[in-house]
Each structure stands twice: as C-alpha cells, then as structure tokens.
Image (cartoon, helix red, strand yellow):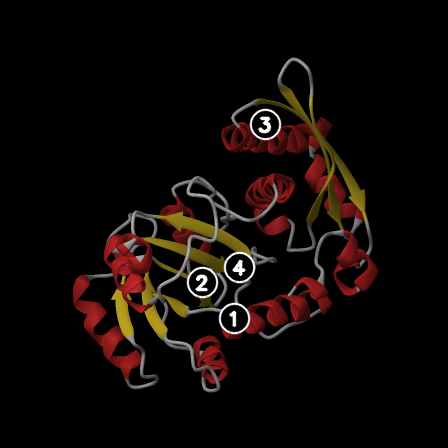
Amino acid sequence: MNNQTEHKSGFISIIGRPNVGKSTFLNRVIGQKIAIMSDKPQTTRNKVQGVLTTDDAQLIFIDTPGIHKPKHRLGDFMMKVAQNTLKEVDLILFMVNAEEGFGKGEEFILEKFQSVKTPIFLVINKIDTIHPDQLFAIIESYKEKYPFKEIVPISALEGNNVETLLTQIKKYLPEGPQFYPADQVTDHPERFIVSELIREKALHLTREEIPHSLAVVIEKMERKSNDVINVMATIIVERDSQKGIIIGKQGSMLKEIGKRARTDIENLLGNKVYLELWVKVQKDWRNKMTQLRDFGFREDEY
C-alpha cells in the first residue's frame, strides 16, 4: 500500500520557440519516435502526449506548437493550443536553444508566463553545440528575467543531463495514480502518428521548396489477412507548383518520401506496410476553417 501513496504522476508541458528541440527531447525521453522532427520551425501542430512510466512515477509530456506570432488561421489555432496547455499542467518546461541568444521570441513567451502559477523550469537545450564556458553567461541572463524553479542544461540529441532533468521533474509532481498502462507511450491514435511520419519525410526531402503548406490525411489503414497493413494517404499542398515538387521527376520524390516513411511506419507498427501516396492541391487550406477541421485541427478538443 505504501508504494501506491508514494507514486507520482503529472502532466508536463514543453514550451518554447519553434525549432529549439522539443520534439527531439520528447522522442529521447520516450525512447521511440512519436513526434515529428525537422530542422524547419513550426512542424508540430497538435499536442503530442508522450507517456514515460517508471517504477515510482508516470510523466505525461505535452509537446506544444512553438509559440510564435500567428500569420494565418492555422497559426492562430497553434497559438491557442500552446497557451491553453499552460493552464492545464503540473509543470512547464521552457526550452531554449543554447546557440541562440535571448530575443523577441523568448520575451514574447515570458510575457505569457506572467499570469501562470504553474512551476516553470528553464531547460537550455543543444549544449553540445556551444563551449562549456558560454553556459554560465546564458544561465545568468535568464535568471535575471524570470524566477525559474530549476535551470537544467541538456542535449536532447546526445542525451546529456536528460536523466538529471527527469529526476528534478519528479520532485515537483504531485502524488497520483498511473493514468495510462505502463506500455503505452502516447495517447494519439496510430493513424495520427503515421500521418506525421509521412509529413516529416515530405518536409525533410523537399527542404526549402515546400513551406508549411503541407498536410497529410490518412484515407485508409487496414490490416490484410497476410499481416500486411495497407495505408493509403493523401499529401495536401496549396499550389500546383508544390504538387509538382512533391511528385518529382517521373514520381521520384513521391517514391522516396514513401520509401522513407514506410520504414518508420513499419518500426512503429511492427508489421510489413504497403503504403500508397497521393498528392492533392487544396488552395489556401491553412486559412479555411472547414479544411482545417477536415485535416484534424479541431479547436473544440483543446
């Protein structure tokens, strides 16, 4: 009975400017890929919950869209999600990039923290990219700006100090039950993660040519009798020229996106996968609420 009363559990939000390494951190902690990773900012659009269960605690991480000033209705949606999350959690991790100095983006986020009563950690990520001597100055500059409960420097990519951060997190969580089964790592349905893996490959392979006007809709996902999973997905873009880029010369780009995505999907599902990809143009979909809802961005869920 004692063990039950000592069990801790809680919800931890990861907040930060786009591209500070939030998804890399989440994937590192959970031990498998559940969040899309890209060197382009603003790739995370929905809350992704990652669940880490240990002997004495259950940590439920929420990876929010990077906080930024919105430029379209999709941007408004992403900001609403991020800000609502601040009020719902037991602890906030404010993640910053060690390579980049304090700027307007960080200032914008700290302003949002003024009305928040939740404990906030400063997590300085990407310390593997700077000289150790630079770290002290970064820590001091942030100390002056906000009374953080803890300041923890890490490298999510290399894994440096991540265990220390997890230990500190546990200290601040309330006693509570195990919300999820021990072997569950996310609360998102498989279809969502599959669509994110396809989107990640498309963004990665097209680099600067395709901005964030790209969505992926899973049309069909079914298990065949020979234990192969059939996945049919449509990649949505905003312009005909983008469709051409995604398809590539004689279909070469689409084939490569499919090949790379299939490998990740097979690892996720533990099955052979037959993946069929289509490309469709939906002009200006990021500013149309009906299409945002069709693609899974539902404000009422937040």
Amino acid, disc 1: Glu
Mark 1 packing: few (<14 Cα in 10 Å), some, or many (20+)? Answer: few
For the residue labelled by badge 1, is the local secondary structure a helix, a strand or a loop? helix
Residue 76 locus on image (x, y percent): 67, 71
Q: Which mark is residue 53?
A: none
Residue 10 locus on image (x, y percent): 41, 62
Horizontal side of 132 relative to 92 (left or right) equals: left
Q: Is residue 200 above or below residue 83?
A: above
The reply to whether residue 126 is in sight is: no
Task: Answer with mark 4 or mark 3, whichever residue precedes in sequence.
Answer: 4
Disc 4 target residue: 41
Horizontal side of 127 relative to 268 (left or right) equals: left
Disc 3 target residue: 259
Amino acid, disc 4: Pro
**Displayed quadrant of residue 195:** top right
Q: Which mark is residue 88?
A: 1
